[in-house]
Structures are given as structure tokens and as C-alpha cells.
Image: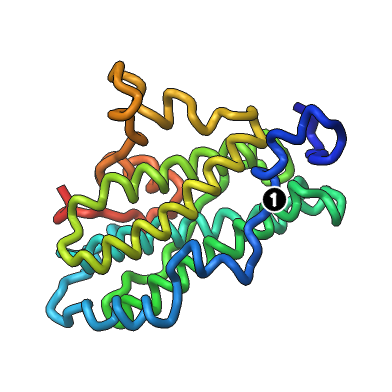
Amino acid sequence: MSDTLRPNSSDDNQGAQPLYVPIKRRSFFMYAGATAGATALLLTGCKDDDDSSIDAKTTVDVGVGDVGVLNYAYALEQLEAAFYAEVLKGGYFTGLAPAAAERQIFADIALHEQIHADFFKTALAGNAIKALTPNFSAINFGDRTSVLTSARAFEDLGVAAYNGAGRFITDPKFLVVAGKIVSVEARHAAIIRDLITPNSFVANDVIDFSTTSATARQERSKLPAEVLAVANTFLAESSKVSAKSLV
């Protein structure tokens, strides 16, 4: 696959072309569920007595109950939003042609992730954890391969995190909102994977093919401890996250 995405370069590429079309910004809210109504829904569900405490030294704990799950999602969305903000400033992105589809894809994903983070912060109100400080020193934002492989890791981790956290949600309304947001994250994961290797969004590391029944196959999911073990490697020492109640 060439470094420059050319969705209209040949008839052979037409089958994959729809995946290259960025989600329209005005349509995003239909996919994400991040509407004013959904925000009000979450605000009514956040109890003042939920604990989203920060450990005395360095660890930020997400808290307990549904608020803990929402803070867990907020922490991951903060990390993704910060990553894509750096992508947009890096040499790989700025070196792309203004009309390049790959450039528009990353611009749209960056917008989506910031909307997700802002949504959770607003919805959690006084129960939100603090703003986290990322550490992306291991990522070369001037290199396409480094950016794409990092984006794939973040998106796959995010989808697996939402899939694994659903079991901890007690309010069905929150589960609906989380389901809408993870569907957008899955779209991100699919397009990033397609930029690296076409059709790899159905690879074994994404879908569990251990069962012989196609109808029983599911997206892989990860519990918070497993997710945070990876996410924390991209957070500064003062921003490491724990989810002690989500086990």
C-alpha cells in the first residue's frame, strides 16, 4: 500500500472506497449519541456520593459504580483526544496534501475524539477526574508508520475497553450511550486498520475466531486492569489511572 491514499486512482479500489469516506461532522452526533439530551441523561444519573478520588501521590482512581465506568471512559477518551491533537501538529499529517483523503480522515477522527472527551467531562460534571497529562515520547509523529500503528493500538484498545466495561454498567441508559460511542470507535479502528492493511479490521486480533460457529464469534474485549496496563504507558507519572472498583 502506498504512503498516499488515492481512493479514486483505479477501478480496483472502488470496492474499498466507502471506507475511505470520512464521517460528516454534522452527522457525527447521530453516531456518537453525544447530544444535549444524552448529556442531560447522564447528568441526572451521576450521584454526588460517588467517589472519584485521586490517590495521595500519583494514581488517579476512576471511582465506583456507573460514575467509575464513565470516568474510565473519560480517561481513555482524554488519551485518544490528546494523541490525535499531536498527530495534527506532527510532520506526517502536515506533510499530507490538503485534499488527501488520509488527511481528512485524521482531522475527522481528532474532532470525534475531542467531542467524546468533552462529552464525558460535561456529563460527569463535578464527578469527573482531573485532566490527564499524556506521555507520547515513544511515538514519532513525523513518521506515517509510527502514527498509524499507534492509532491502531489506541483504537483497538478503546473498542476492547468499551466492550469489556459494559458488564459494570447498572443503568441501561448509560449502556445505550456507551454502545453508541463504541460504534464510532469501531469505525475509527476499521479505517485506521484499512489504511495499514486493507480488510484487516476483521483479523484474529480483533475478532475471536476460536469458535467454529460464525454467529458466536465476537469482538475481543478487555477488562479495565488489562486496558490500563497499556494506557498508563502513555500517561505521565502524575496521571496514571486505576480502576480498583471495576474488577
Q: Is residue 243 above or below residue 141?
A: below
Please give the name of the residue rendered at 30% of the width and 79% of the height, measured from the top-left corner: 41
Q: Which residue is mark 1?
A: 21
Q: Quadrant of residue 178?
A: bottom left
Q: Nearer the viewer, residue 199 or 118?
A: 199
Identified at 30% across, 21% down, the residue is 213
Task: Answer left or right for 142 relative to 100.
Answer: left
Screen quadrant of the N terminus: top right
Against 80, residue 213 (above or below) is above
- 87 above or below 193? below
On the image, the x and y values in percent for residue 197 come to 64, 28
Give the image location of residue 7, x and y in percent.
Answer: 79, 40
Residue 227's place in the image compared with 125, above or below, is above
**Image quarter of residue 68:** bottom left
Q: How many numbered discs, if any?
A: 1
Q: x, y (%) of residue 123? A: 35, 77
The residue under label 1 is which amino acid type? Val
Q: Is residue 56 visible?
A: no
User: Image check: 222 left or right of 93?
Assistant: left
